[in-house]
Amino acid sequence: MEFFERFAIPHPSPLIYASMVAIGLVSIAIIVGITYFKKWGYLWNEWLTTVDHKKIGIMYIISALLMLFRGGADAIMMRLQTAVPENSFLDAQHYNEVFTTHGVVMIMFMAMPFIIGLMNFIVPLQIGARDVAFPRLNAISFWLFFFGAMLFNLSFVVGGSPDAGWTNYYPLASNEFSPSVGVNYYNWALQISGIGTLMTGINFIATILKMRAPGMKLMKMPMFTWASLLTNVIIVFAFPVLTIALVMGTFDRQFGTHFFTSMNGGMDMMWANLFWVWGHPEVYILILPAFGIYSEIISTFSQRNLYGYKSMVWSMVLISLFSFTVWLHHFFTMGQNAFTNSIFSITTIAIAIPTGIKIFNWLLTMRKGKIRFTVPMLYSIAFIPLFTIGGATGVMLGMASADYQYHNTMFLVAHFHNVIIPGVVFAVLAGFTYWWPKMFGFMLNEKIGKWAFWFLSIGFCLAFFPMYITGLNGQARRMYTYSEATGFGPLNLLSFFGAGLMAIAFVLIVYNVYYSFRHSPRNVGDDPWNARSLEWATHNPVPEYNFAVAPEVKSSEALWDQKKHGHKLFNKEYEEIHMPNKSGVPFIMGVLFFIFGFSFIFAIWLGVILSAIGIFACMIYRTFEQDHGFHISVKEIKETEEKFGGADK
Amino acid sequence: MKLKWALLSLVFTMALVLTGCEPLLVLNPQGPQAETQANVIWISIATMAIILIIVLAILITVLVKYRASKQSDDYEPPHIKGNPIVEGIIVGFPILIIIFLGIVSVNSVYKVEATPEGYEDQEPLVIYASSSNWKWHFSYPEEDIETVNAVFIPEDRPIEFKLYSYGPITSFWIPQLAGQKYAMADMVTTLHLAADQPGDYMGRNANFSGEGFAENIFDVTVLTQKDFDKWVDDIHNTAEPITEKEFNKLLEPGHLGKLFYTGTHLDFSPAPEGEHAGHNHGDASEHEDHLEHSHH
Amino acid sequence: MKLDHSQPLEYSTDQNRLNILGFWIFLGAEIMLFATLFTSYFVYEDRIGSGPSGADIFEITPVLIETIILLTSSFTIGLAIHAMRINRTKAMTVFLGITLLLGAAFLATEIYEFNHYYHIGATLQTSGFTGILLTTLGTHGAHVTLGLFWGAMILIQIMKRGLTPQIANKSFIFSLYWHFLDVVWIFIFSFIYLKGMM
């Protein structure tokens, strides 16, 4: 019995039991449904074994949306609990678990995969490539992320969720103060998906550096590609730090080492340092691609070229460099001397310079334009003032002496939601809407999209602006309750109301997908937005081989050149196209990593050994495999192209 | 569209009304350190407001002037790469603002990390404040008393809180007197403050430390020097001495009310400084050196 | 598969060139990984708690043996790649084989060294210092172990299939990896052992 007891939830509640039942029923329903409609073969052949960057991108986005609802449910529970003083909807332990999983899920399993999903789909198209540099590795990246995310979510029903905050500071996260397996889940879920992300980073740097269409010099890349390149450079440099930090944490919790303990030479602040050396660049990993998306959208819907292309690129390069020099601002209050705090204060607020340049460039791009208020553009327009507020409060937080007052308060919570929601979430939703026809060949309904936009932006303002005020009034973050005398009540109620509006917005977005799938016209053509960059020069939805012949470009706005300046993108005859074979190995490796992580979390060493052997077996299989891919014949290409009615391309 | 704007303006009025009732704790400082911080906050809000207004003004102008519905169908937006003067302005303007705020920031950091201004010639009162799950223990070595979850300080005198923790990292915070500072298990950090006038203030741990975190608060009472001396005498007359056994009982996880003792726990459970620091391989002088450096 | 004969075999196809670039980027990530370990090592170097310090436990003999073995193996892998470039498959397999044997000898010495630490009471759990020491050395050792298996697989493939562009590519990348481990070892030797013993 003892063996099974550790899988039990340490702090059960009716809510968790209900979720267990719900998860069980949904899983059964999915399995029955797939079997009934005989879709197992389709699922395996078309999706689980695919190495196509477009399908992998779509799978990333679907997973991200699922995780958005998981993290969103957490958010609603938190705001509901704190909506009124002395509420008893959640107890302290559950509240702690909920805000921990909310943070981890939203950053690691929602924002990251959403960004990486868009990157997967769009970057190869924007540079005129057939696929990424290492398609098989790309599939492994996805499945490691996916099973990492699944592992993390499993903690909810098996063994208990992590409860030490997404920052997971030691010694709070040590066995002494967090005895359940929750933090083990944190370590392994992040480790596994982190390895996947690192490989994505390598893959995309190689892709962007080596696989660009003829004529596309570095300074002629579309802005989203530039942003992706820099993001992936940050990934490659930042994620190994997380890897080591997580290994040290795992050793402390599972092998009794003294890295972050308070005895025998351990140092609890070391975790905070390593975590933020990764964690701060992580924020820029999210925001740079978002900047890229906004650049594409603002330029398209202003019908103008991007103002100050060069300064846009250089400001992103600067932001990437700065991202590694500011981590200490996450703990100005740790007792360093005034000199150290001054240095990090200056580097922190200095980031406002390149960011400010970008804001002005976007404004100047719209100037003299012909602005169309489509859904992607609405998100981009709302982004500018909202992100300016978020950035401004960021500068305020960067003032070290004042940070002593903002630190750990709702002011901080308001700030980082103020940059992440209008910055990243608005961007991925804008990108999602903008590139949707690229993925599926029809448009999302504009009317429903606009309703969702208004609900989301107004909900956002209502949910988070009050937090600036309660923070300055002394409300610390992560408090599961507060007394009536504090006076935090009314503003927290307002926040809850705002969170509700945001929830409605997300439901509307999903409804929009359903509605448009049923009702949108299918003949949108190849260029429904009157766009400018190369990804719109192929068909909607994109054929398997992306471009029938390799395009030749001469500026960052390849399609615009073709439309307005008579530039010919496609000059060659059709040739056979070489494509990579699909493979089940990445999926199997994902499953094995899942078993490995799960066994390690519960110290089931046999499972660890067997799954490790399995993982090595997959690698050995791979090295002996002689896989030369397959070819798409000229005849097939012609047929596909004629089907799209664009035989001239 | 009108409805949306109406809703938005309603929200902002509501927010203003709600906050207008009473001053926010952080912006209602009662001591020189908190006042420095409140001033920095106001300066940065004002500076940032200027930027926000500029951005909003440009955005609204551009949206009104260049919307597609206002332009003729054959209007073809020009291709503009950039302009050195304009780009110089959009680079130079943020740089100037950051230089200004940088100077403010550095000055104020040195200010709050030192004895409060105007109190330099006074001998500071040293109070050791240590956290345990989920309480605060205050030891007055000079007065030889110890309290739990309540701290009494005299007005117009510089106070040095020496902070450390018996457990997770906590953050010592009295919003109206000074900003936060971490309390950690293997080193002692120092928080300087002074209080301008007698009164009761809220203090708490601001750094998440587990299940009892929300209630991890303490009361701060500022007394005149005379009342403070009387309070110390009262404790000596009425309270029991603190023993190691009693103290270990206090350390057990949970919540306690306010407690008062004579003596301090520093005698049998010294703070992690000097030879007792977590970094226990060398002598005290080396430890000083260690504290001077930031921890990374 | 288009072969470009103006390039060495390992660079002769597009995919080969991509693989080599990709591996260089991977090595960038590895540099960050070891940089993090070294930084942590410097932080914990003096945090020995009640355990021994570096000067107490380091022994010069096994460390010198490890260093000489690994440096030699870096030389032999270089010879192997040279043999590959001049198309001498037989010589290449011999040198690759010697490299792997040297790698195994290195590992054996390292296991002896770890065993020694264990017996004098310097284990992973002893202190912050011993923990980071064994983690850093162990990470390098795990890389060498992985390299041994990888190299062995490549050796088998050369013997079975001869020198194809793919196998030449794998061998070349493996040599990059092996040189990298050597460089890391030089840092370990200088900044952990020599610094600790002085």
Image (cartoon, coloured by chain):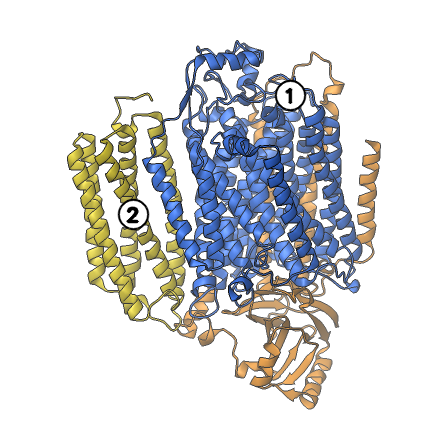
Chain colours: A blue, B orange, C yellow
The Cα–Cα distance between marks 2 and 1, rounded to whole angstroms, is 51 Å
Q: Which of A352 and B71 is in front in this view?
A: B71
User: Eyeballing the image, is A222 above or below B167?
Assistant: above
Q: Residue at 43% across / 48% down in the picture?
A: A240
Residue A529's disc number: 1
Q: Position of residue B87 (x, y in %)?
A: 57, 30
Q: How crowded is mark 1: few (under 14 residues within 10 Å), some or many (20 or more)?
A: some
Q: Which of B115 and A357 is in front in this view?
A: A357
- Horizontal relation, residue A365 to residue C6: left or right: right
Host chain of mark 1: A
User: Residue A407, can we see it?
Assistant: no
Q: Where is residue A472 in the image (x, y as percent from the top left)?
A: 71, 56
Asked if the residue under mark 1 is in contact with the one under mark 2, i.e. CB atoms within 8 Å, the reply is no
User: Eyeballing the image, is B267 above or below A567?
Assistant: below
Host chain of mark 2: C
User: What's the residue type where badge 2 is placed?
Assistant: Leu
Residue C181's disc number: 2
